[in-house]
Amino acid sequence: MAEVTNKANSSHDTSKPVNKEFDPQEAMDRASFFYKKNQNVILGGLAAVVIVVGGYFAYKNFVSKPNEAKAQAMIFHAQEYFARDSFKLALNGDGNNYGFLQVIDKYGSTQAGNLARYDAGVSYMRLGDYQKAIDMLNGFSASDDVLQPMALGVTGDAYMELNKIDEAVTAYKKAGHASDNNLTSAMYLFRAGLALEKAGKNQEAIDVYKEIRSKYPNTLEGRDMDKYLARLGEVKE
């Protein structure tokens, strides 16, 4: 009886997995069924990808590049006036050639249009129209390690002219920290320190001067920091 029982138990043993061979035809049938069931969604998704990719290349080649070339041509004479300190002509043009404002209006999304905002902001600053300078420079953005800090620095200068010292300090600090270089960082942090002194915020000025002395000791500003710190009662031991 024991032998019969063991045979019976072994014939119903489900502890071992059942190995089923892979059937390629069955897999193809399932894939075909899935495609037919979801055909509209799949084709719609592919169409969307084609439209997006095709649209990008079409815009880049047939809109973006030609517009950039046109903007570069438009800005040329304005930059010549800018270099000669003829800022009104640089902004508005001379009747025959466009100024920065026209370049911005027509091709503001191009690189040349973006640069025109910076040049226009500086032009307004030099003409004494400080709020327009601020507004124009706030619309400028660049990844350049020098030009972006300078735009922020000129914004700080404009705020100082308007006696908006807190806003000037904010702009100067942004300019000083926008990139880490000896050309602009120390200069604009130093202006932030002077503005803080003018506002009577001596401790904040001390912190800025110490930052300059620590990070940029070999710059013109860095070499003078002990003098400015001593003036505020901070003597280096």
Image (spheres, rainbow, N blue to C red):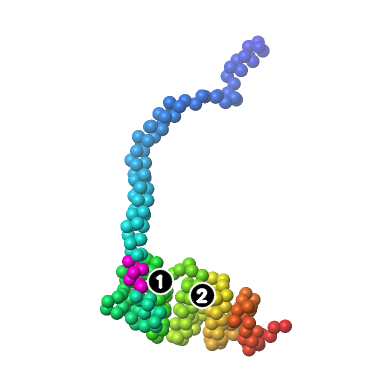
Which residue is under mark 2?
Answer: 175
Residue at 37% of width from left, 48% of height from top?
Answer: 49
Which residue is under mark 1?
Answer: 115
Q: Quadrant of residue 42?
A: top left
Q: Please, is residue 206 above or below residue 140 in the view?
A: below
As measured in the structure, the alpha-carbon distance from the residue carrying label 2 to the one carrying label 1 is: 17 Å
Residue at 57% of width from left, 26% of height from top?
Answer: 17
Between residue 203 and residue 192, name the one nearer to us. 192
Which percent across, then down, holds residue 205? 59, 82
Q: Is residue 60 visible?
A: yes
Residue at 35% of width from left, 51% of height from top?
Answer: 54
**Is residue 147 left or right of 200 when viewed as pictured?**
left
Magenta span of residues: 70-76
Secondary element at image label 2: helix
Which percent across, then down, holds residue 58? 33, 54
Identify the image quadrant of the C terminus.
Answer: bottom right
